[in-house]
Image (cartoon, grey):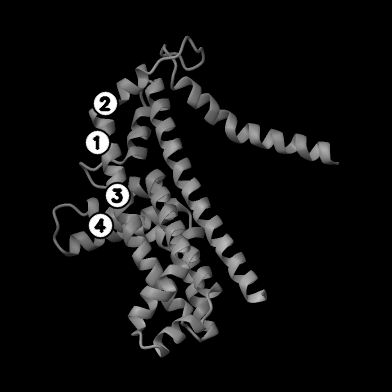
Amino acid sequence: MKPIAKVYTAIIFIFLFAPIAILLVFSFNQGNSLSVFSGFSLYWYEELLGDSNTLEALRNTLILALCSAILATLMGTAAAVGMNKLRSRPMRAAMNTVTNLPMVNPEIITGISLMLMFVFVGRMMGLATSLNFGTILIAHITFSLPFVILQVLPKLRQMDKALPEAAMDLGCTPLRAFLKVELPEIFPGILTGFIMAFTLSLDDFVISYFTTGNGFETLPIRIYSMTKKTVTPKMYALATIIFFAILILLLLSNLADRDENDRQKARRKGKAD
């Protein structure tokens, strides 16, 4: 049974990572063929650095991802703290349901509904254009927010509830108790939520396509427009850079989770002793 399981696992990993491996290899191809590797070269990376439109889209994407991740993390942390303090079970169940809706809702439905709302509000306010950087920023915060809440909320529930109460008994204000006691305890969840919000915003296409305005192009939209023309290894070079950027963020997230697990194990061991 074990050899069959190993073969099955190997096949799954091949299907998952073979396309990525091909992409990485052909991003260093000397020629412009997408099927024949003619030699190692950084030519397509140089071509990518000379593409001003793609670099502009990359800059827009990074600014959007950073802004939306910061705002979603702040709002999601505040929402998680509020949800954790709810005592009514029906209210907590309702809040959990509302939080999960943006994640289970198809992205195309979310994108179209947000676009219609932005256009409606824009026309009511008499704006010349209803879609701009602000609308796509709100859209990215909307779909990133539940992921931040789901990362922070378990950390709040795992924390000893007596810690902030003890801090306030010793003279701390509620805000100071949160900053000095609760925030360090839930920081790994906040960091993981920030990384997830950043990566989700970085590669989103569907919602961005419906909520962005003229003159603001994100990298996924740029890649989509490039696929309508002749595909060159320059796109492979771009995808390789994005892949390693996401990989680094995932490694940071895993390191934060591992440190938190080690801290909890040490704490439980100390209590047992």
The amino acid type, in three-letter code, at marker 1 is Glu
The amino acid type, in three-letter code, at marker 2 is Asp
- Which residue position holds label 2? 51
Determine the secondary structure under disc 2. Answer: loop
Question: Is label 4 in contact with label 2 (beta carbons under 8 Å)?
Answer: no
- Choose the circle earlier in sequence order: 1 or 4: 1
Label 4 – label 2 distance at C-alpha = 32 Å
- Choose the circle earlier in sequence order: 2 or 1: 2
- Which residue position holds label 1? 56
Instruction: Say the numbered circle drawn on residue 64.
Output: 3
Q: Nearer the viewer, residue 120 or 156?
A: 156
Q: Quadrant of residue 33?
A: top left
Label 1 – label 4 distance at C-alpha = 26 Å
Q: Is residue 179 left or right of residue 263?
A: left
The amino acid type, in three-letter code, at marker 3 is Leu
Is residue 231 something one can see in this rendering?
Answer: no
- Choose the circle earlier in sequence order: 4 or 2: 2
Q: Quadrant of the N terminus?
A: top right
Label 1 – label 3 distance at C-alpha = 12 Å
- Choose the circle earlier in sequence order: 1 or 3: 1
Instruction: Say the numbered circle drawn on residue 214.
Output: none
